Amino acid sequence: MAGIGTAALRLDGPAKVTGGAHYGSDAPFGKPLYGVLVTSGIARGRITAIDEQDARAEPGVVDIFTYRNIGKIVPGNIMDGDGYMGTSIAPLASAAIKHDGQIVALVVADTFEAASAAAYRLKIDYAEEVPAATFDSPGTETVAGVVASKKHKDPAVGDAEGAFAGAPVKIDAHYATATQHHNPIELFTTACSWSGGKLTVWESSQNMWGAKTGLALQLGISPDDIHFVSPFVGGAFGSRGSLTQRTAIVALAAKKLARPVKLATARDQGFTIATYRAETRHHLKLGATRDGKLVSVSHEGFEVTSRPDNYMVSGTDASTRLYGCPNVASKVSIVHADRNTPGFMRSPAETPYIFALECAMDELAYALNMDPVELRKVNDTQNEPIKGLPYSSRSLVPCFDAAAKAFGWSKRSMQPGSMREGEWLVGWGTATTMYPSNISASTARVTLFPNGTAKVQTATHEIGQGIYTVCALIAAGKLGVDPANVIVELGDSNLPPAPVSGGSNSTASVSNAVSKACDEILAKRAQGANGAIEAYAENIPKGDPPDAIRKLYKGQPSFTGGTESKDSIRFAFGAQFVEVRVHRLTREIRVSRTTGAFAAGTIVNPTTARSQLMGGMIWGISAALHEATEIDPRNARYTNKDLADYLIPVNADIGDIEVIMIPEEDSIVNPLGIKGIGELGNVGMNAAVANAVFHATGVRIRQIPIRLESLLVA
Amino acid sequence: MRGFEYVRAADPADAIHAARQTSSAPPTLAPTQFLAGGTTLLDLMKLDIMRPTRVVDISGFRNRTDGIAFDRQGLHLGAFVTMAEAADHPDIRRDYPIIAQSLDLAASAQIRNMATLGGNVLQRTRCSYFRDTSWQACNKRSPGSGCAALRGLNRKHAVLGTSENCIATYPGDFAQALVALGADIEIAGPSGARRVKFEDLHVAPDAHPEIETILNPDELITGFAVPAGPWTRRSLYLKVRDRESYEFALASAAVALDLHDGVVNEARIALGGVATKPWRAREAEAALKGRALSEANARQAAEAAFATTKTHGHNDYKPELGRRTLVRALMQAATVEA
């Protein structure tokens, strides 16, 4: 009988490859108008003049919306601070410009072509002020994390400084990661239609109930009057978890014009109207005994954010707890610059911070002349060092054993530059990956029909992870029906709420709610119910606050997991191995093969789990060698806002990828024992690639992406 | 993009007639533009960088003009042959591998199916400041406005053939193969046909970065004549970049060798990704002539090729990368069967 653990193909696969899956801009609105955004060419200053005459002369133009006529939009708070927005910078609130590419106008026309042409004909003059672009730019403001946010803590235990001073082997190094943008293939589109005071919004989202609640607050209407629809999402990676400021603008334009309005933003606009992963800097100090035991770990991080918002990823939460060590210190600071507010991007906290830690661990292995895998094993622990809490489960060593064996790690020679194939230097690197196992309160409605079919309804989001199929498998297993006979409805805010599909929580949160509803159906059937049996269930995970369901109906998740629990610490782990080749002369870096072993509790669908982990590993290669948004420090503007210059790997860049799933049982994280895997695959890869580049060349590069010019030495 | 008048030309003469210009603007800024594969023009029109008021569609010539032909003098390529057609031609792959490789390593399969050879050599730079009209300063886009790249992010910019007014890199690949092989280009215009050295087609930016070629706005490229030589078979195109495919060169080298017992009779060398125009490296060719093709000699030739560069910060690495690219290309070419 199919159920949890069945390797199942995506039930929505045929629709996706035949055009049957509908995305945001596929909104079935009759006779819509088309909107095109105009964005600012400066990062700081104000609009001094808007000349609409030429633009309005373009045939087909219906209206132009700017700060002068859009009407009232409440900016809202960012999601990281209990709001729903990606940024609190309201672009059309005034003439003020606060970041590059800020929305300054929405041109609406009968056709997309007319709106596009008119957008170029709109003349906007600015008074420009000198902006602060990034780290080291004059005019930035650095604020300690503990000052900026009540939620942030700087984990610490013992005397890290003293232990470092006395340690026989030390690493003291600085690392940096680049600005990155999600660049989902589906552009940021919004379609709005009003009918009888009620608003329907088609917009790809990771957070239906949050989006409708947030938009209601912005527009000053009831959330009950907003219907958000997003049956499929063409890539999200965190970019659609919070609400962008564009949605309210389109909604007000549609209202004023009494016609549906569809907006499709251009690729370059996606770099400035949505969130991004900010650049980070790290100072790592590791002290160890000569046999490799860590005696001191110190991690200081710096993250860029916007002027008004205290967005912060605080990855020291994870990095200070990865290895056993009696003396730990950490500090996170944010650096305010004239930028849009950054936001969630696949493993927001762990990716940059674990990169720094895992590179430093590789450096320590070389300082000790100890195998990098052995160093991780020596420092493995079943209790996190800060409070001494037990890991609910931690299978890091079995992951290293399995991945090392599959990769052939025992054939590695430790000496950098010692492995070669023809003209290519070969390097093997490794790193640990970890990601918190989150779960939130969630709800679901399940119906079992007499003909042996079933229906699952929950407002979760298909962001490519395969949640349609997961819901069907859970219900099929519980109710004893064929997964192909389970209809799954999601991506619609009229359905019972599910939390934001972020933090790798959805499979755990939604599966447990669906499972609970199925249990109620079985109980009703046992009590003699017949005909169609329906059950609505609210699952409140152990440790969630009592008002978790009320919050969920306001579009706010209540995450428990990671370091949030009082009795245990909950993470999934993995070991990642990478082989790179670097040409001896021209120094191109190519990844020829990778192996990852992961232990993440119950795997609901091994087929889609493998895809997710593989996708994460590819993402990690991309971050390590390709992705970087370039910012011109003179005026805080991005310069590579297209997919020709913002590099992601092509197929030819990705060699063999081996994904190994290590069985693991964890009855603490949730009743079904599910740990999220959506963000586990990429976290360790950045360091594993960088460590492999060092092994190939003997050159230690401490910032990503690693470009060939940094290897053009001797 | 903005609205424009669309004209479909019946043949080259009709196209040239339709393109007769009323302004004195250089071809890059001319109000009338030819549309062949559209892979550059439409892209730049969508970005509002090129704003022709009239577009003359010449894509229909494809089946009515010259294709790919060989004779004792060499190879003739019609301007309307697509990149894919030329790259996939078995005789070109065998006898002129440098040409096939320069095309294969460019763009994507989809673009190679659309783009014509005539349009390919006129592809415009990928300089970020050129391709975004919200940057005020770009002498190429807006003559006299300055150059944002000189003190901007210029990792991918040129180190050869630059001026104080422009350091934008010539982005193409195929042109380097033509330069190395000493091809001619055939041009049709209102006063008849002319034939010039392909090497003379492109001009360095100097005081006028908006002038990229010697073409007049109403002139049309009709074909390429590539002379056969003892070096054409032992030739290759090496392209170095951040990712394996679908990216412009950080540095590239087009190399063709006439070798006798390991000694260079003649070397033909052109460099890409490092220069403002397709760059013939004559100093490197001279340095190799009559010498054994050792890595040390190749390095000396590469030093000669990059003897006079100008860098601007982020592209300080390019001369060294260019040298290494040339060394690697030469050593690799030596192993090719003639």
Image (tube, rainbow, N blue to C red):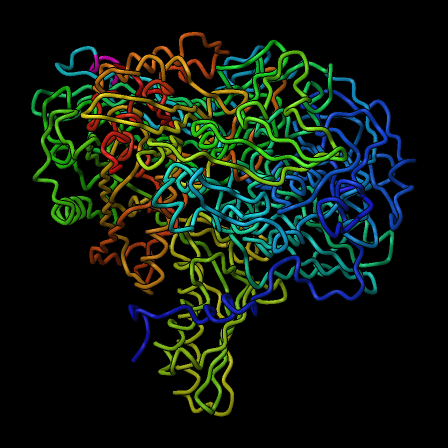
Considering depth in this image, is A339 or A143 the residue closer to the camera? A339
Q: Which span is picked out in magenta?
A: A160-164
Q: Position of residue B221 (x, y in %)?
A: 63, 37
Depth check: give the residue in front, A16 or A522.
Answer: A16
Residue B318 lies in what quarter of the image?
A: top left
Along the horizontal axis of the image, is A404 left or right of B83?
left
Residue drawn at the location 17% of the way across and 33% of the way down: A422
Q: Horizontal placement of B149 versus A444: left or right? A: right
- Whether residue A366 appears in magenta in the rendering, the answer is no
Residue A338 x %, y %? 62, 22
Q: Does residue A3 appear anywhere in the picture?
A: yes
User: x and y percent of residue A343 in the render?
Assistant: 53, 37
| Front residue (pair A65, A658) | A658
| Residue B315: % across, % down | 46, 17
Q: Is residue A180 above or below residue B297?
A: below
Q: Is residue B86 above or below residue B241?
A: below
In the image, residue A220 above or below residue B183: below
Q: Can you say which quadrant of the picture contains the N terminus of chain A?
A: bottom left
Whether residue A150 appears in this view of the structure is: no
Placement of A321 over or under B137, stated as above or below: below
